[in-house]
Image: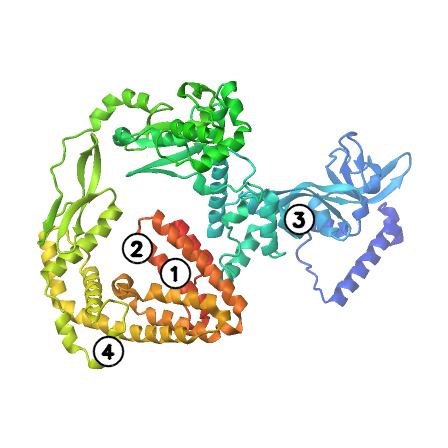
């Protein structure tokens, strides 16, 4: 064999070396239980990848500076041996079986490789570095660029990877800052959109107050989320998985409250000082705010519908909105000539004192201001002394006249000039006066149109006719809004039904037992008959609701009347049956409250008496309504439950009382701001359910309730 190798010009030792390696590989495979595939020859790629595992330090990357050189491990530089088959092809990546140094470092027995093979084989040797972590809205995650090197050779120069696996704390911080704080996120979560809406409202308040320091900084918002979101939430996907479970335990965990978004040093800025609507008599005009000095509409803009232009007086708008009134008065005083102005120094103090005495909105502003300055400074200010040109433009209201599509027709600071300018346009909107539709003293039904157009103060407006309850009769009157129309129509229809349907009081009274009559006699009404009349109106409300509500035409009213006539007695008896145990329970609660004399419970007892008086009073049956009458026993039981336990934890009772009292005050204020009986009614009973949840949790509530939920419902309304 040695002579054959010599004859064939083969290296006998190299062949024996190959034979030994082959034998060793067979033995290793046999010990591992691996069966050799003797039919299919191995692919060159597979062979090279296998050899690469032992030649990781013999890898080279083409040097871009010197075309014939390769950069190897640890900065070494070599060239492909001229006798190699790859000498002329010069691939980008090579691996070499031998690195021989003669005149220079040569690579012998070479093969073309891919850097992906090296990374896969050298996981334990490569070094990874990451740069430019950044939030990607589309990915919903923090991404970064990865660089992978082996002995200094860059296998991967810039590969985008998910940074959440690399540095979870930093990825979480970037997720919170960009997605939640800055709002750079596309998501369906309700809290996120509610929070963005609140932020927009506070930003709008900055426009109104013409300040840039009202909204809290991003660090405050970050701390809010940072304290509530777990440490393992590093991306949108992680957040969705966590929030899917967390929101059931605490739906308001991540919801902002407007108070937390306003800086403590905002100087007592109140939204009430910058209203959305200007109210004057029957007028409700929309207000918008713009904080862009130099523009024509900088400041407050009043949106005046074209048909109402003639009805809008100029004098009330001289007073500006409350938030800008002090600045306006100060600017007016500073516009006075120096000989007059020196009597009112310091100007801001005189302006504040004058404002405290002014009867806001009564008469022209300058006239009222002259009167108060004369009282404060003892100097009369002549009307000619005022220089209105020195008053900044943003302190003078802009009037924007809009058409029925809210499209701007004209705007300016002078209301009289706008009227004159738009006089031809206004004339086009005036139509023939509508026939008189108001009537009084009606005891029989008349058809009532849903809407009617009338000319008021020379301008056409849409009005809403409805029946109005006048005690012993009804009338037809018109209202400005559909909500007022619906409320009046219900009461007017109910009165007309009472006038046209026999009273069921005698029939129901005959069906009552003496014990029931005794229970009904303990009522907050003037008499038992007064209570029964209350039950009649409640029964009428139920039957009207069952019959589809008020009728607007004679045929519909006849159908409704027959429906009421057939069921009034039975319905009233059912209501009286419901009321009897309610009055009995209320009587027991009242006795227990009167018998409790512990001085430590004075505040709690006063609160419970107030609650009882709001539940049981003259007219409570009708006000409560059939649909909610069945809940009153639970509310009364909740008072007894609280009485049994109030002495055990007075501090908690005081805190709960304060919470409910604040919610109730907000509700009372809302009643004066909103004309929406169904919405107000729903919130009123939410407050009662809040009491149950705070003072008598064992009784349960039909739906989740909290003070935040009540406030949110108020805000929605």
Residue 169 coordinates in the image, percent (x, y): 66, 51
Q: In which quadrant will I find the N terminus? A: bottom right
Residue 678: assigned label = 2
Left or right? Give the position of 360 relative to 19.
left
Locate residue 581, reporting x and y percent. 29, 75
Q: Which mark is residue 5?
A: none
Q: Dot 3: what SS?
A: helix
Give the foreground label among 2 and 4: 4
Q: Quadrant of residue 415?
A: top left
In the image, is residue 364 above or below residue 546?
A: above
Q: Position of residue 352 (x, y in %)?
A: 50, 34
Mark 2 or mark 4, earlier in chain:
4
Is 601 on the left or on the right of 131, as rendered? left
Residue at which label 1 appears: 686
Q: Which residue is mark 3?
A: 170
Quarter assignment of residue 636 = bottom left
Measuring 15% from the left and 45% from the top, which residue is drawn there? Answer: 449
**Residue depth check, mark 3 versus mark 1: number of the one nearer the observer:** 1
Q: Secondary structure at mark 2?
A: helix
Pointer 4 residue: 518
């Amino acid at each position: 064999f040695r002579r054959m190798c010599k004859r064939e010009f083969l290296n006998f030792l190299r062949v024996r070396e190959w034979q030994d390696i082959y034998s060793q590989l067979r033995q290793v495979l046999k010990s591992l239980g691996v069966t050799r595939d003797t039919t299919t020859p191995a692919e060159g790629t597979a062979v090279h990848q296998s050899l690469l595992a032992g030649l990781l330090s013999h890898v080279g990357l083409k040097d871009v500076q010197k075309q014939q050189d390769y950069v190897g491990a640890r900065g070494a530089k070599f060239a492909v041996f001229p006798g190699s088959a790859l000498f002329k092809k010069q691939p980008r990546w090579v691996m070499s079986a031998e690195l021989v140094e003669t005149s220079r470092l040569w690579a012998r027995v070479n093969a073309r490789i891919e850097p992906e093979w090296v990374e896969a084989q050298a996981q334990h040797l490569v070094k990874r570095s990451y740069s430019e972590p950044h939030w990607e809205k589309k990915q919903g995650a923090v991404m970064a660029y990865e660089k992978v090197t082996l002995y200094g050779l860059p296998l991967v120069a810039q590969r985008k990877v998910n940074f959440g696996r690399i540095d979870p704390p930093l990825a979480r911080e970037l997720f919170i800052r960009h997605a939640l704080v800055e709002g750079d996120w596309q998501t369906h979560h309700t809290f996120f959109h509610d929070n963005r809406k609140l932020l927009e409202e506070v930003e709008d308040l900055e426009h109104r107050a013409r300040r840039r320091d009202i909204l809290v900084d991003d660090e405050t918002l970050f701390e809010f989320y940072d304290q509530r979101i777990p440490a393992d939430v590093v991306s949108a996907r992680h957040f969705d998985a966590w929030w899917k479970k967390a929101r059931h335990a605490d739906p308001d965990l991540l919801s902002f409250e407007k108070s937390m978004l306003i800086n403590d040093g905002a100087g007592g800025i109140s939204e009430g000082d910058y209203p959305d609507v200007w109210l004057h008599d029957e007028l409700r005009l929309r207000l918008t705010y713009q904080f862009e000095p130099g523009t024509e509409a900088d400041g407050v803009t009043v949106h005046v519908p074209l048909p109402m232009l003639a009805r809008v007086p100029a004098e009330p708008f001289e007073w500006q909105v409350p938030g800008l009134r002090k600045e306006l008065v100060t600017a007016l005083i500073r516009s006075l000539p120096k000989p007059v102005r020196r009597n009112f120094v310091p100007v801001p103090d005189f302006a504040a004192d004058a404002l405290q005495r002014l009867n806001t909105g009564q008469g022209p502003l300058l006239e009222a201001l002259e009167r108060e300055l004369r009282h404060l400074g003892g100097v009369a200010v002549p009307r000619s002394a005022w220089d209105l040109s020195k008053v900044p433009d943003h302190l003078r209201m802009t009037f924007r006249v809009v058409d029925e599509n809210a499209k701007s027709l004209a705007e300016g600071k002078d209301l009289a000039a706008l009227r004159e300018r738009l006089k031809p346009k206004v004339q086009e909107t005036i139509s023939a006066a509508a026939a008189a539709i108001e009537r009084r003293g009606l005891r029989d039904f008349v058809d009532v149109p849903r809407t009617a157009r009338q000319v008021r103060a020379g301008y056409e407006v849409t009005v809403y006719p409805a029946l109005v309850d006048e005690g012993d009769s009804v009338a037809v009157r018109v209202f400005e809004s559909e909500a007022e129309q619906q409320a009046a129509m219900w009461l007017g229809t109910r009165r007309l039904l009472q006038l046209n349907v026999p009273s069921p009081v005698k029939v129901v009274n005959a069906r009552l037992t003496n014990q029931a009559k005794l229970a009904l006699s303990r009522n907050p009404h003037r008499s038992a008959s007064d209570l029964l009349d209350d039950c009649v109106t409640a029964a009428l409300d139920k039957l009207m609701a069952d019959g589809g509500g008020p009728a607007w035409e004679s045929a519909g009213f006849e159908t409704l009347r027959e429906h009421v006539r057939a069921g009034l007695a039975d319905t009233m008896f059912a209501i009286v049956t419901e009321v009897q145990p309610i009055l009995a329970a209320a009587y027991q609660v009242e006795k227990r409250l009167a018998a409790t004399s512990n001085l430590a419970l004075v505040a709690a007892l006063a609160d419970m008496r107030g609650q009882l008086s709001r539940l049981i009073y003259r007219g409570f049956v009708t006000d409560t309504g059939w649909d909610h009458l069945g809940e009153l026993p639970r509310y009364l039981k909740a008072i007894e439950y609280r009485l049994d336990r109030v002495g055990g934890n007075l501090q908690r009772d005081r805190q709960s009382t304060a919470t409910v009292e604040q919610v109730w005050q907000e509700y009372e204020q809302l009643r004066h701001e909103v004309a929406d009986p169904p919405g107000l009614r729903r919130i009123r009973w939410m407050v009662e359910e809040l009491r149950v949840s705070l003072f008598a949790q064992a009784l349960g509530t039909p739906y989740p309730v909290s003070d935040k939920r009540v406030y949110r419902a108020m805000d929605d309304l």
